[in-house]
Image (cartoon, rainbow, N blue to C red):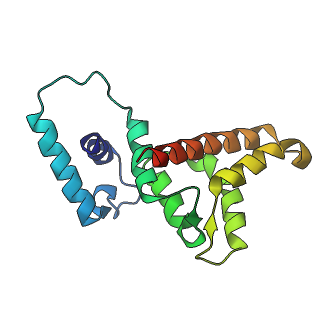
Amino acid sequence: MLNALTSYLQQQAPVMPEHNPVNTQPGSQVDAVTAAQNKNDTNTGHNPYSPSQRALMVSAVASDFDVRSLPAGEVSNFQSRLQQYGLIDGRDLNALALINTARAELDDQTPLDTVAILNEARHQFGERGTGYSERQQINRLHTLIQNLASARMTQ
């Protein structure tokens, strides 16, 4: 799984010219990637289940961030990681404003439950008069956050 993640990241264009996402991994993650590559090299059996690239990315982000208890000071790192792995793009950043707004009201160590924030936003579509495109953005982010929460539970 980590081998596929590494391969995917190596094939992606850097977000910034001087920034290479593959080289920003902490040392323990690099060791884990190397171990996973060595394991895959020696494993000649056929595995009928092969997770998608998106599932690998979601799992990688979920291992670093708990979306049910995300420290307010980590929201920008969380957003950067989502963008780095290609899980969100420019149009989804507007939906992240809901999380950033909730973060602004708290100190950096207070945890945010991003699942609850997005659930509440979805329940208030009618009350707030939310437009179609904003609803779509919130729904996409809600699905991603739910996937991250689910991936975190299975680890």
Q: How many numbered discs, if any? A: 0
Q: Is residue 29 left or right of residue 141?
A: left
Q: Is residue 72 visible?
A: yes
The location of residue 22, given as percent across then percent down, is 29, 56
Residue 48, placed above or below residue 16: above
Which of the 4 image quarters holds residue 133?
top right
Q: Where's residue 111, x and y in %?
A: 61, 68
- 2 vs 125, left or right, is left
Q: 95 above or below 133? A: below
Residue in the picture at 84% in, 47% down: 124
Horizontal side of residue 126 vs 90, given as left or right: right
Quarter residue 137 falls in: top right
Residue at point 41%, 45% (across, down): 59
Q: Which residue appears at 70% of the width and 38% of the height? A: 136
Q: Quadrant of the N terminus?
A: top left
Give the residue furthest to the front: 154
Q: Percent position (x, y) of residue 20?
A: 32, 59
Say whether residue 88 is visible.
no
Residue drawn at point x = 47 percent, y = 44 percent: 151
Q: Is residue 131 left or right of residue 141?
A: right
Q: Nearer the viewer, residue 35 or 7?
A: 35
Where 92 sits versus 17, above or below? above
122 or 79, nearer to the observer: 122
Residue 61 image point, x, y percent: 44, 52
